[in-house]
Image: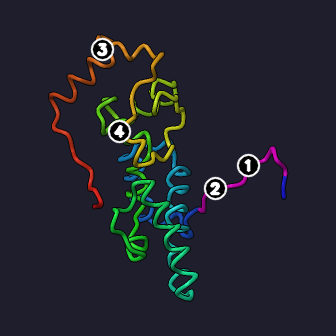
């Protein structure tokens, strides 16, 4: 079992950590999605590789077993908003790390225009100014379900609910002056 005080690693590190192409792509993703460190990136990469590994193992099963487990996997990824409604097992094999990173609360808060940068979005979430369905969430890496996405907003007791708050005015000014970049969507 292990010591309950000692957390286990939830990620796998790269096999060749000092290859320049790996370092560059990791650094680009860390900056693009406002991640705190590479461990956050590795955790999400491990998640994608586990989903893809499950999908590969399903390909070798009999039809009866495969049908049930394939439905469970695809339904879970649909609820996360990673796969479209008419997805198949091949779509699971095509998953990328960006698909998962787009579903993080930090990214969605920025994309909805509640913060003027990814780093400010992380700060607002950490300081408990962001809520989903009125419930505060303090983890920037929380993976938002597709039905929770429209319910992201400021926490009811946060001072940011005031439309004249200085942060909201600066966000509004930033959004008006800069064109928004739409993320790629699946389905």
Residues under numbered marks 2 and 1 in contact, where contact means CB atoms less than 8 Å apart: yes
Q: How far apart in space, not on screen, are marks 3 and 4 (Cα)?
A: 19 Å
How far apart are the two marked residues, 4 and 1, measured between alpha carbons? 33 Å
Which one is earlier in the sequence, the residue at label 2 or at label 3?
Answer: 2
Q: Are marks 3 and 1 in contact (CB under 8 Å)?
A: no
Q: Which of disc 1 and disc 3 is earlier in sequence?
A: 1
- Near mark 4 (Cα within 10 A), the count class, few <14, some 14-19 or many ≥20, is few
Q: Secondary structure at mark 3?
A: loop
Q: Which mark sits nearer the N-terminus, 4 or 2?
A: 2
Instruction: Estimate how packed mark 2 is, as few (under 14), some (14 to 19) or many (20 or more) residues with alpha carbons within 10 Å.
Output: few
Residue 25 vertical placement versus 153 (above, below): below
Q: Quadrant of residue 53?
A: bottom right
Image quadrant in which the C terminus is located: bottom left
At label 3, counting other C-alpha atoms closer than 10 Å, the crowd grade (few under 14, some 14-19, many 20 or more) is few
Residue position for label 2: 10
Question: What residue is shown with label 4?
Answer: 150
Front tag of 3 and 1: 3
Which residue is more in the foreground, 112 or 76?
76
Residue 47, how many percent across, how many down?
Answer: 54, 61
Image position, residue 118 (x, y; %):
37, 37
Crowdedness of circle 1 by 10 Å Cα count: few (<14), some, many (20+)? few
Quadrant (top left/top right/bottom left/bottom right) for the N terminus: bottom right
Look at mark 3 in the image and give the residue it sits on. 163
């Amino acid at each position: 079992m292990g010591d309950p005080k000692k957390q286990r690693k939830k990620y796998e590190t790269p096999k060749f950590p000092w290859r320049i192409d790996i370092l560059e792509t990791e650094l680009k993703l860390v900056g693009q999605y406002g991640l705190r460190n590479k461990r956050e990136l590795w955790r999400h990469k491990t998640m994608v590789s586990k989903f893809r590994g499950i999908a590969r193992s399903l390909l070798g099963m009999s039809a009866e077993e495969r049908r049930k487990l394939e439905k469970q996997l695809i339904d879970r990824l649909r609820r996360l908003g990673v796969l479209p409604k008419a997805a198949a097992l091949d779509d699971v094999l095509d998953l990328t790390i960006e698909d998962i990173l787009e579903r993080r609360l930090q990214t969605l808060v920025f994309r909805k225009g509640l913060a003027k940068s990814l780093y400010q979005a992380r700060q607002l979430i950490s300081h408990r100014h962001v809520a989903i369905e009125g419930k505060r969430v303090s983890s920037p890496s929380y993976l938002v379900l597709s039905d929770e996405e429209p319910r992201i907003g400021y926490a009811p007791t946060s001072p940011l609910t005031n439309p004249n708050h200085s942060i909201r005015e600066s966000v509004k000014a930033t959004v008006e002056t800069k064109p928004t970049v739409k993320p790629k969507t699946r389905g």
